[in-house]
Amino acid sequence: MNASTTTVAPDALPKLSVVIPNYNDGRYLERCLCAVLSQDRPADEVVVFDDGSTDDSLERLEVLHRRWPQVKVVPLGKNQGVVAVLNHSLGGITGDWVHFLAADDLALPGLYHLAMREATRHPQAGALFGAFVASHEITADRFTETADKWIPAGYQPPEGMVWRLFHKAPALFSLGYANIWRTQALRDIGGFIPELGPYSDTVAFRCVTAKHGGVYLGGSPVVCVRVSTETYGGQVWKDVQKYSEILMLTAEFMRTRFHNLFPERYIRNWEAKVISEVGLRPWPKWRRSKHALSYALFHFWLWVTRLLGR
């Protein structure tokens, strides 16, 4: 990734916090912190929250803190769960922007330079998001997840983000591993919803970008992710019934707590795609046709507004 095309004075950049929740991933902490601290644009604050680990995480963190004193270690004692840890961290971090990075994932070189450059250009955005490359722990298979098929690089206003998230993108699409959030925007929506478990970051992303827009950093991966059935998300997605319940609860929250952000017709379209994507039943042909017509009309409207100079 080439993030050096534009030079911005360091004191003009907003502050960035990196929060690393950890539970029994002590063996990955050194490489995770090394990747964060070796960025050409360092984070202004790095905090590791240990969520009651029963392995040797705290001992490893003590050694790493002596090597890198700028890394703050917060032992939470009793295990609370990752969503609770993320919400807890929101109350104490000092950065204008925050990247939540799993202890077993890696921030790739140039990420924070690129992200903070875009944050300076688009301070109104609710989130910055980019592609990630995933590597399966057992098979070593790799794949890259991007948004290139449904969104161009750069800033997208709220209405554009809502349209793309509910009509163009798959219902289950998420780049959560590579999201960098505007801290206050995330606080304003109440943080992450614990009842939604590993889908809570996807819902929060839809909410903050529906209010403030978002910046897509492009298709080059910015984070490397470890994939395993034993990870937090992997355990839930194995249970289709549990997965479906979370997704239906998501629709309920969108209709109640966030009813002012999402039109009802968008939610209904999203629900239909969810049922298809989790394998419960095919997406109806009539809805596909309606979706294609809506997409064509949307682009016609964009063409007319640009032609009129609005």
Image (spheres, helix red, strand yellow):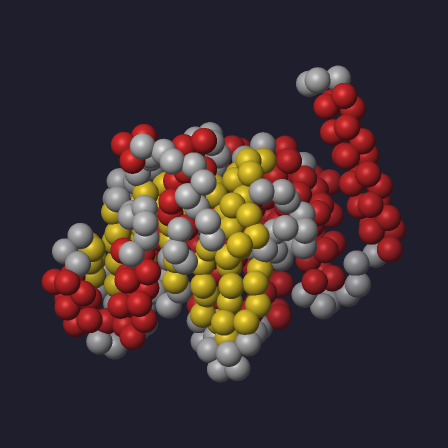
Residue placed farthest to the left in the image?
66
Question: What quarter of the picture does the C terminus occupy?
Answer: top right
Whether residue 244 sits left or right of residue 136 in the image: it is: right
- Residue 191, compared with residue 28, is above or below; it is above
Whether residue 47 sits left or right of residue 115 in the image: it is: left
- Residue occupying the point 26% across, 52% down: 46
- Residue 237, compared with residue 304, is above or below; it is below
- Residue occupying the point 48% across, 43% down: 128
- Residue occupying the point 29% across, 47% down: 43
Whether residue 117 sits left or right of residue 235 in the image: it is: left
Residue 255 in view in this figure: no
Mark count: 0
Pick whichever, 126 or 186, lies toward us. Answer: 126
- Residue 216, compared with residue 108, is above or below; it is above
- Residue occupying the point 87% across, 55% down: 285
Residue 139 in view in this figure: yes
Pick whichever, 72 or 84, lies toward us. Answer: 72
Measured from the top left, where is residue 297 in percent x and y? 81, 34
